[in-house]
Structure formats: C-alpha cells, structure tokens
Image (tube, helix red, strand yellow):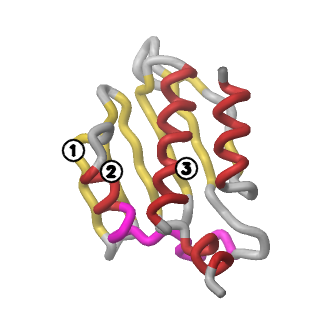
Amino acid sequence: MEDKHIKEIKGLLPDSQISEVKPCTTEGKCQIHMRVTAANLDVLTKIIDVKKFCSVLKESQKFQDVKCSAELGLIKATVDEAELSVLASGRIVIKNADNVKEAYEILAELAHLLDESKSFLPLVDKKSP
C-alpha cells in the first residue's frame, strides 16, 4: 500500500524526500516526515505559498482545525487524531497517525492538493510559459 502512495507522491512532486514511518511518543501511533523540494533549491527557500495552501486546506472536508501563520511560514491541522504541520520551507510532518496506511494517505492527499492548488511555487514557475 505504501508503494502505491510513494509512487503517487513522487509522480506529483518528483524531488520530494519521504522518511520512513516511525513510532510516535503516543503508544500505538506513528509519524512520518516529508521534505517537498525541487532541484537546485536551498533548504531555507520558502517553496510553499502558506496563504494559498491554508485556504485550500480550510476548504477541504478532510482537514480540521486548520491554523495558519504566513509570518511564521506554518500551517497546522488535524485529520481525525493525526496532527500535521506544513512549513513554507517544504517540510511536512504528520504525527499521531493510527497506522502506516493513514500516514501515507494523508501525505498523498497533501501532495495532490499542493499540485492542484498551485501552492508549490517551483511547480508554478515550471508550468508558466
């Protein structure tokens, strides 16, 4: 199941890096980290449009308790009990996921929303004429 989601994510965000799923401090839960990036970018470059992506997550039925700070470059939200953080630098952290499948499903959904909403700035620049 994870392979399907990894292929899906890599198809949308080919330079992204996904860590292995690790146990959370909450017993029975897991966490995963992803770094969304593009070739030749410095790790501190702001590559996610926080304001735009925040609006997209707020409109989505899947994400709850969406809180955003463009000034801090941070979005926080929940999916059921899972907590996620999205940083303008491209780092995505999902904690307290029930299982590996849920962690990868949330990452895949975020990848689709980043692509569809044009919130991932290197993709926007690449697709512009």
Disc 1 target residue? 65
Could you tell me which secondary element the residue under label 1 belongs to?
strand
Residue under the image location 50 percent in, 44 percent down: 93
Count of numbered labels shown in the rendering: 3
Asked if the residue at tag 1 contacts the one at tag 2, i.e. Cβ–Cβ closer than 8 Å, the answer is yes
| 16 relative position to 119: left or right | right
In this view, the residue farthest toward the top is 28
Could you tell me which secondary element the residue under label 3 belongs to?
helix
Asked if the residue at tag 1 contacts the one at tag 3, i.e. Cβ–Cβ closer than 8 Å, the answer is no
Disc 3 target residue? 111
Task: Quadrant for the C terminus, please.
Answer: bottom right
x then y, percent, for residue 103: 52, 29
- Report the magenta residues as a range: 42-53
In this view, the residue farthest toward the bottom is 129
Q: Is residue 70 above or below residue 86?
A: below
- Whether the magenta-drawn stretch holds residue 44 is answered as yes
Q: Which is nearer the eye, 119 or 18?
A: 119
Task: Quadrant for the N terminus, please.
Answer: top right
Kind of residue indicated by mark 3: Ala
Residue under the image location 21 percent in, 44 percent down: 65
Q: Residues under labels 3 and 1: Cα distance?
A: 19 Å
Q: Is residue 4 above or below residue 78?
A: above
| 54 relative position to 111: left or right | left
Kind of residue indicated by mark 1: Asp
x then y, percent, for residue 2: 67, 25
Q: Is residue 117 above or below residue 26?
A: below
Residue under the image location 57 percent in, 35 percent down: 32
Q: Quadrant of residue 53?
A: bottom left
Disc 2 target residue? 76
